[in-house]
Amino acid sequence: MRWVLREKGEVYDAEPVSLPLDGMPPDFPSVMLTSLDSRHRIDIARTRVNVYRTRTAEDSPLDFRSVAGSLGRLVAELAEQSQVPIGRLAIVGHSSAVAEEPGKEVARHFFRERWLQGALNSPEHLEIHTRKMFPLANGLKVNSWVRVRTAERLVGPTPIVWIEQDINSLEEERPELDFSRSEVFDFFDHAISEFSTILNLYFPPEPALKEV
């Protein structure tokens, strides 16, 4: 934590939060560092570190690849400064789209007409979760989760379709792995490429009109 406050204090400039660890599981965060503008956050536990970049109302749409590169560097630097091995990596990305009736939008997108005329004719809330396992381009086996669900933005409130993508290395391989700095960068780089590929599989771009 001292290193973050010393080297990144201009980013994590809000008052640090420190919690007692008595009786808490090892992955429970005991230190939380945030920025005053709510864009940046780090949660530090004994066996886990989560780093966040959150889009605020003042932000333009975030470039996932740029954000992933920054977060990857921070993760690698934290591990080096703490002199602890990195046995597992994960990246989670959220995106959303405004929809007047998000339940119906999700149903129409994923289900056949026979279901839309029956059980799914008017869903207020709908969630779809899928999980796959595959090797990234660097050969590392990963889990890939996609979650599509109805939600609301707090401002408005505005109904939306919420999409979460989660790519993570395997928990059972954690004891055998110790990611180097370059391997951390490779993971984030390859995972972000997969994010784009996977999102296009679930939500294919509309075909361009051909000139006649």
Image: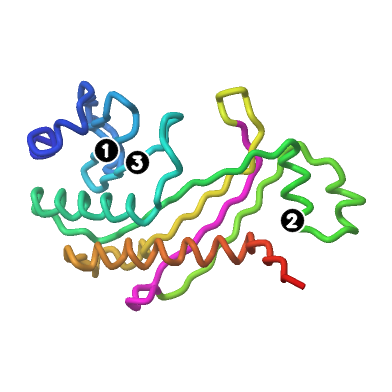
Percent coordinates x, y for residue 24 in the rendering: 29, 34
Amino acid of disc 3: Arg
Q: In terms of image quadrants, where is residue 84?
A: bottom left
Dominant secondary-structure state across the stretch colored magenta: strand
Element class at badge 1: strand
Residue 122 located left or right of residue 154? right
Task: Looking at the picture, tell me which residue is in the foreground, 25 or 143.
Answer: 143
The N terminus sits in image quarter: top left
Is residue 10 shown above or below 148?
Answer: above
Q: Earlier in the sequence, mark 3 or mark 1?
A: 1
Residue under pointer 3: 53
- Asked whether the residues under the numbered discs 2 and 1 touch, taking CB atoms below 8 Å apart as contact, a structural biologist would say no
The residue tagged 2 is: 109
Looking at the picture, does residue 76 appear above or below residue 24?
below
Residue 144 lies left or right of residue 116; in this view the side is: left
- Tag nearer the camera, 2 or 1: 2
Marks 2 and 3, how far apart at CA: 29 Å
Q: Quadrant of the C terminus?
A: bottom right
Name of the residue lying farthest toward the front? 212
